């Protein structure tokens, strides 16, 4: 008979073989549903979000959400292996979504299955395998939360090398615009927006966010896109920029927008203010349990579905974040095995 880890790895291999780009996760949702059927666990589906609750669910007890996503980004052009051909080579399980976040997802599903029929847990458990995380789309975890019972604390499964990410930076993406006057290139123009760029770039690079977080460090502002003009003989009316701002826990996204818009030498329009930073107190029993198991704490610079949660949340999972979205993505089989074991030990201390 296969062990729980072997079953979880087989599930991951199946999920890898099924394309599941954001908003196209119908077939992976069906495969996850099949797992619950095979283990006689009642489950529900909303859109492409699949969720289940532990057998002894009691609305009078606090609830722990176990969440990870089953959508992936599209494979990049540098792949030399078939991104949908899951295979194990030298202890590495290759395939698109294996590391981000398939390993964490199947490990959490295994964890939930292990404790599903625990007779008298201190926490209710909800397992939610959700969609559209990679695109921050409207039909992912954020759309499911109103359907679920109130959540008191969450584990969000992402690759953290099974270390405890007790805080995560938020994100605000700004569309910037440097305005000028359009004209024919043959005529004088003292209001060419492209020539205003040096001042704008210097302002952006020198902008100082005073508050630095002990866990997440400083706010990081990065200019990621610049575009202007379509014809060689036309001065454009504007230069368009995209600015990526990773926000620490000292600021709300609304405060970040107000600070940047106050004196900016360009128009800065935030796309969304909803992806705030998130954290869990270091003294929370879940964090303390992880520390007792030899895990270390840190602040994560990358965004996840933690940003959708209003409760304390811990980001934790097998795999390495630096492998995410890379060509020939992989996760070590041993990382999944160790991840499932550590998840089980962690919950044993609080359940």
Image: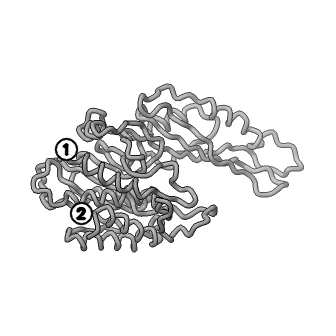
In the image, is 341 to the left or to the right of 178?
Answer: left
- Picture coordinates of residue 158, whole percent (x, y): 40, 51
- Picture coordinates of residue 255, whole percent (x, y): 45, 35
Residue at the location (68% across, 32% down)? 202
- Picture coordinates of residue 108, whole percent (x, y): 31, 56
Residue at the location (70% across, 48% down)? 238
Of 172 and 25, nearer the camera is 25
Q: Which residue is mark 2?
A: 52
Q: How many marks?
A: 2
Of 211 and 331, nearer the camera is 331
Q: Secondary structure at mark 1?
A: helix
Q: Which residue is mark 1?
A: 350
Instruction: Please say if 252 is above or below 339.
Output: above
Q: Where is residue 248, by image quadrant?
A: top left
In the image, is 294 to the left or to the right of 54?
Answer: right
Q: Residue furthest top?
A: 210
Query: Residue 261 has which mark?
Result: none
Name which of mark 2 and mark 1 comes first in the sequence.
2
């Amino acid at each position: 008979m296969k062990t729980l880890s072997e079953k979880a790895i087989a599930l991951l291999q199946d999920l890898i073989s099924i394309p599941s780009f954001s908003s196209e996760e119908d077939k992976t949702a069906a495969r996850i549903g099949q797992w619950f059927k095979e283990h006689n666990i009642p489950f529900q589906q909303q859109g492409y979000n699949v969720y289940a609750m532990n057998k002894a669910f009691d609305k009078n007890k606090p609830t722990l959400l176990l969440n990870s996503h089953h959508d992936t980004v599209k494979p990049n052009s540098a792949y030399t292996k078939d991104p949908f051909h899951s295979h194990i080579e030298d202890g590495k399980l290759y395939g698109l979504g294996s590391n981000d976040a398939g390993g964490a997802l199947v490990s959490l599903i295994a964890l939930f299955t292990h404790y599903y029929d625990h007779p008298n847990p201190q926490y209710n458990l909800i397992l939610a395998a959700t969609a559209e995380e990679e695109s921050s789309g409207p039909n992912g975890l954020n759309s499911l939360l109103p359907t679920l019972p109130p959540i008191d604390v969450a584990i969000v499964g992402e690759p953290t090398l099974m270390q405890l990410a007790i805080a995560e930076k938020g994100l605000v993406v700004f569309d910037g615009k440097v305005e000028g006057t359009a004209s024919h290139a043959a005529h004088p123009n003292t209001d060419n927006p492209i020539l205003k760029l040096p001042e704008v770039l210097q302002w952006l690079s020198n902008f100082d966010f005073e508050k630095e977080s002990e866990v997440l460090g400083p706010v990081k502002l990065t200019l990621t896109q610049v575009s202007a003009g379509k014809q060689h003989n036309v001065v454009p009316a504007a230069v368009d920029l995209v600015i990526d701002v990773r926000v620490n826990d000292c600021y709300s996204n609304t405060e970040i927008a107000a600070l940047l818009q106050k004196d900016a030498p360009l128009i800065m329009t935030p796309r969304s203010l909803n992806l705030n930073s998130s954290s869990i107190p270091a003294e929370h029993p879940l964090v303390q349990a992880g520390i007792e198991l030899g895990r270390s704490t840190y602040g994560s610079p990358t965004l996840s579905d933690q940003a959708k949660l209003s409760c304390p949340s811990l980001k934790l999972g097998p795999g390495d974040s630096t492998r995410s979205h890379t060509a020939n993505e992989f996760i070590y089989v041993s990382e999944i095995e160790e991840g499932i074991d550590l998840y089980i030990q962690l919950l044993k201390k609080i359940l």
